[in-house]
Amino acid sequence: MAATVRDVAGRASVSIGTVSRYLNGQSLRDSNRERIEAAIRELNFKENIIAKGLKNNRSMTVGLMISGYVDFFATQIAYNIELELEKNNYSLTVCEFNNNSQRLEKKLEFLMNRSVDGIIIYVSNIYESQMLRKCVELGIPVVSINGIINGGEGIDSIVVDNANSSYQAIEYLIRSDHKRIAIINGQLEDYTYRERMQGYVKALQEYGIKMDPALISTSYQNNFLENACQSFIDIYNQLERNSRPTAVFTANMIMTYGVMKAINQLNLDCPQNISFIGFDWNPAFDVYRPPLTVVRQPENRIGILAAKLILDQLSGRRKSRTHITTIESQLKINQSVAPCKE
């Protein structure tokens, strides 16, 4: 016969109410929590999640909206969110909206119809969303990652310091004596790419380097890889030899793959002919020849923090509020940057 809450309480020498508070994520004295956890292990106690949801009028499910499935950064965040939620007996429902505002509204309506208890949204732009505002009005906790929601009163946001991250990357190239630094960026209407461009511009200005529009190119979301590839080929081939870039910085992972492809097609030697830094890390970049220097965002930490913010609101430990948490990235130095010889 399966163990019950009463059995756990008896074995741990605490009240049933104390066990219930533990199961609902409320704070307890360390001694009580340790005895309850020991009793759960000894009795092989399994909480009835369906019954708990019915009792608390909850689905024990959190919805996650992501902009696409091909982004390693986004999938790692989703993985860590799910791990953290599972520790607290919540499951995760994932929807993709391809950075389309109409699709976003439709998918949010789907999640609300599924009675999710909270919503985490991974965005790369600043959106206005009637459905998100409705969620907040209904008391459904919402956390945004990587972007900020317009009119997002009551929504917690987690963002990486994009401007400072790209500044550090460009500064590293400048200190390696590079002055002609190309950037392959996304559209400036997008919050993320606007911030990354600001870091690029600031670094050049602070080091007294004149910005050359011929070294700046935009890659479009519907085909980042091929756009980035062709953009760098065009920059390199259309400029005179003495005006060509000696280094390149890409503003996301897919663009990085595109410039890798371009470097191969141009038969350039990295880092002897061109130094290269990308934004976002992927395990493949460590086996690229040479291993790539990248701005690495703390995807594990971001996922765990997003889940904890939702869980804290669901447990009552934290009220919904408009707060932006800014997290620093790390410049992961490898072998794709060499001192400029020109």
Image (cartoon, grey):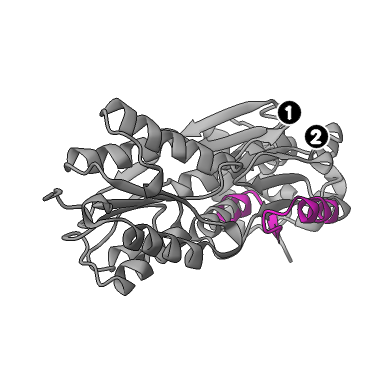
Q: Circle 2 is placed at which residue position?
A: 136
Find residue 286 and report its image quarter.
Answer: bottom left
Q: Which mark is residue 154?
A: 1
Q: Mark 2–mark 1 contact, CB under 8 Å?
A: yes
Q: Secondary structure at mark 1?
A: loop
Kind of residue at badge 1: Gly
Residue 57 horizontal side relative to residue 124, left or right? right
104 left or right of 305? Answer: right
Q: Position of residue 317 (x, y in %)?
A: 67, 29
Q: Nearer the viewer, residue 183 or 19?
A: 183
- Binning the other alpha carbons within 10 Å of mark 1 as few (below 14), some (14 to 19) or many (20 upward) gives some
- Confirm whether residue 227 shows in the render: yes
Distance in Å between CA atoms under marks 2 and 1: 7 Å
Residue 321 is situated, as x and y percent measured from the top left of the image, at 69, 25
What residue sits 49% from the left and 61% below the top?
72
**Which of the two residues, 274 or 53, is positioned nearer the viewer here?**
274
Relative side of 240 to 190, left or right: left
Is 86 left, or right, of 57 in this rendering? left
Start and end of the magenta stretch? 82-111
Q: Is residue 71 inside the magenta stretch? A: no
Q: Is residue 85 above or below residue 305?
A: below
Q: Is 55 drawn above or below residue 33 in the view shown?
A: below
Q: Residue at x 32, y 60 (%)?
A: 236
Is residue 93 shown in magenta? yes
Q: Amino acid at mark 2?
A: Val
Query: In the image, is residue 310 above or below residue 227?
Result: above
The disc at residue 211 is none
